[in-house]
Image (cartoon, rainbow, N blue to C red):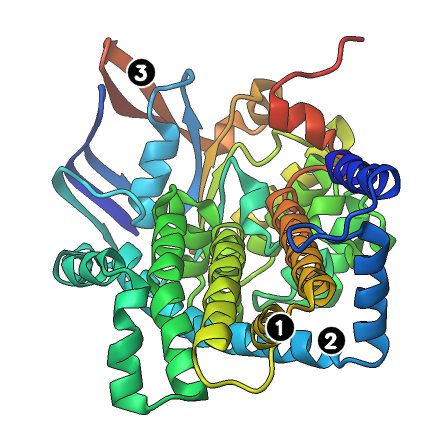
């Protein structure tokens, strides 16, 4: 679905060598220390980061969903969380059900993002993308602000979505405990520093 | 605000101790009485509204032009290469040099006054918008997200999110443009044919040696300008702190000194 060939991204003081990588439908866990290029990789697949070498192609009909580390920025500030949820196509009733399951009080749907906590905003941003009709989900630290219970519910939500055919989930995550019990079903994309200013990506099953 | 009250108190004290009857500075109480009388019977409110309407009309037109050109400047480097010298050239001309030109083109009247305010305010607003676009605008995650979901998000929402992002720099530009525009309007009311506006009335009071009236116009215009400044400062603060948590300690954040606990 996503194919990168001989891909390299050069940033000031940093170079990410992706090489050849073929991403088929499934769950991918982007694993690596801070500053090893996980966010750069996701932004490259999105098209928000230019390649300095090689090419990236996304084949077939695809709709991309994206939850960045600065998830609060993707919520429109003057709209309530409910209106933010409704921006993308998807079953609204189902979104509410999922949010309630994630311990999000429905009365908070009337509030604007500035009046919500980081964890609440992250839940809105995550549910909006996951429950929309996207088939390529790029999630950059999507549980970073959530409590343990919500993280568990978010995992279930992601896992259920990942089971559907033809969906690619690229998930950058430091929260190892959350990922370990699904390790058998995840493809690891390991990001490792090979030099002071260079990192590479290794795919592991 | 406290400093203003101290100045007013000083003026009042001087007026009471040394009764002022000269043309340089009239008695404070007499000036306030003149302002009150002008407010009630002299059409001060009407004149103020006329001057403000002229200023706001000019600044609004300048905002439309400045917004469009500013987007071009910030969004397309090629465009700014062509247009920047033109903008710099216009900014370099003292606006007073253009009085004769506007009068020749449009005659003495409201249109020439409007054109002067537009010419003065447009470069300011253009630069304000363009600088707002440069500040990490392309790196904002919201822009990436809106670009990704372009087909699903209404065009109007996308446009409003652009305006929202530019709001702090735009409001700062509008605040400066209104101050300068008001100066321009008042000068033009004094110098050109006009039969209304605070500039015109203050000039008439000066010609007729009605010093208290003249000071009353100055005082009230100053207060209105002060109020407008405060309004825009409030709006800028509100938009700047919008994405931050509620009830931030603004003073501590702005000064960079958090209180000791």
Q: Dot 1 corresponds to which residue?
A: B198
The 10 Å Cα crowd at callout 3, few under 14, some 14 to 19, many 20 or more, is many
Which residue is pictured at 59% across the width and 52% down the height?
A75
Write down the chain letter for disc 2.
B
Which corner quadrant holds the C terminus of chain B? top right
Q: Dot 3 corresponds to which residue?
A: A192
Write down the chain letter for disc 1.
B
Q: Is residue A42 above or below residue B168?
A: above
Q: Is tag 2's residue or tag 1's residue first in the polypeptide sequence?
A: 2
Q: Quadrant of residue A63?
A: bottom left
Q: Residue A201 at what x, y percent from top left?
A: 27, 25
Q: Quadrant of residue A49?
A: top left
Residues at circles 3 and 2 in contact by the CB criterion of under 8 Å: no
User: In terms of depth relative to the viewer, which is nearer, A80 or A145?
Assistant: A80
Local secondary structure at mark 1: helix
Q: Mark 3 to mark 1: distance in Å?
A: 71 Å
């Amino acid at each position: 679905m996503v194919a990168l060939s001989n891909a390299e991204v050069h940033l000031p003081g940093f170079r990410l060598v992706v090489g050849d990588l073929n991403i088929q439908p499934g769950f991918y866990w982007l694993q690596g220390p801070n500053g090893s290029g996980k966010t750069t990789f996701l932004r490259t697949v999105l098209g928000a980061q230019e390649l300095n070498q090689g090419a990236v192609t996304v084949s077939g009909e695809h709709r991309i969903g994206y939850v960045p580390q600065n998830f609060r920025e993707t919520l429109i500030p003057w709209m309530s969380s409910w209106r933010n949820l409704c921006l993308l196509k998807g079953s609204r009733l189902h979104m509410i059900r999922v949010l309630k399951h994630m311990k999000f009080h429905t009365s908070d749907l009337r509030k604007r993002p500035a009046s919500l906590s980081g964890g609440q905003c992250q839940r809105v941003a995550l549910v909006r993308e996951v429950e929309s009709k996207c088939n390529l989900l790029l999630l950059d630290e999507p549980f970073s602000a959530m409590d343990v219970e919500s993280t568990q519910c978010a995992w279930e939500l992601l896992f259920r979505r990942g089971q559907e055919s033809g969906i690619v989930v690229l998930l950058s995550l430091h929260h190892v405990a959350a990922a370990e019990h699904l390790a058998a079903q995840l493809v690891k994309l390991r990001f490792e520093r090979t030099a002071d200013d260079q990192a590479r990506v290794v795919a592991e099953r | 605000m406290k400093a203003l009250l101290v100045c007013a108190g000083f003026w009042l004290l001087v007026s009471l101790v040394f009764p002022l009857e000269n043309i340089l500075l009239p008695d404070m109480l007499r000036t306030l009485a003149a302002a009150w009388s002008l407010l009630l019977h002299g059409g001060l409110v009407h004149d103020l509204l006329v001057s403000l309407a002229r200023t706001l009309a000019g600044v609004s037109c300048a905002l439309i032009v400045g917004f469009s050109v500013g987007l071009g400047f910030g969004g397309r480097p090629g465009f700014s290469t062509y247009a920047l010298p033109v903008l710099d050239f216009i900014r370099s001309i003292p606006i007073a040099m253009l009085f004769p030109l506007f009068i020749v083109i449009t005659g003495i009247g409201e249109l020439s006054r409007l054109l002067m305010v537009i010419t003065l305010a447009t470069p300011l607003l253009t630069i304000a918008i363009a600088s707002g676009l440069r500040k990490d605008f392309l790196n904002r995650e919201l822009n990436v997200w809106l670009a990704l979901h372009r087909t699903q998000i209404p065009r109007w929402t996308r446009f409003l999110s652009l305006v929202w992002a530019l709001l702090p720099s735009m409001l700062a530009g509008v605040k400066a443009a209104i101050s300068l525009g008001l100066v321009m309007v008042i000068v033009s009311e004094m110098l050109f044919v006009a039969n209304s506006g605070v500039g015109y009335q203050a000039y008439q009071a000066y010609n007729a040696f009605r010093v208290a009236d003249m000071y009353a116009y100055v005082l009230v215009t100053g207060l209105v300008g002060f109020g407008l400044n405060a309004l825009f400062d409030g709006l800028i603060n509100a938009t700047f702190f919008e994405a931050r948590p509620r009830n931030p300690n603004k003073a501590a954040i702005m000064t960079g000194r958090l209180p000791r606990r």
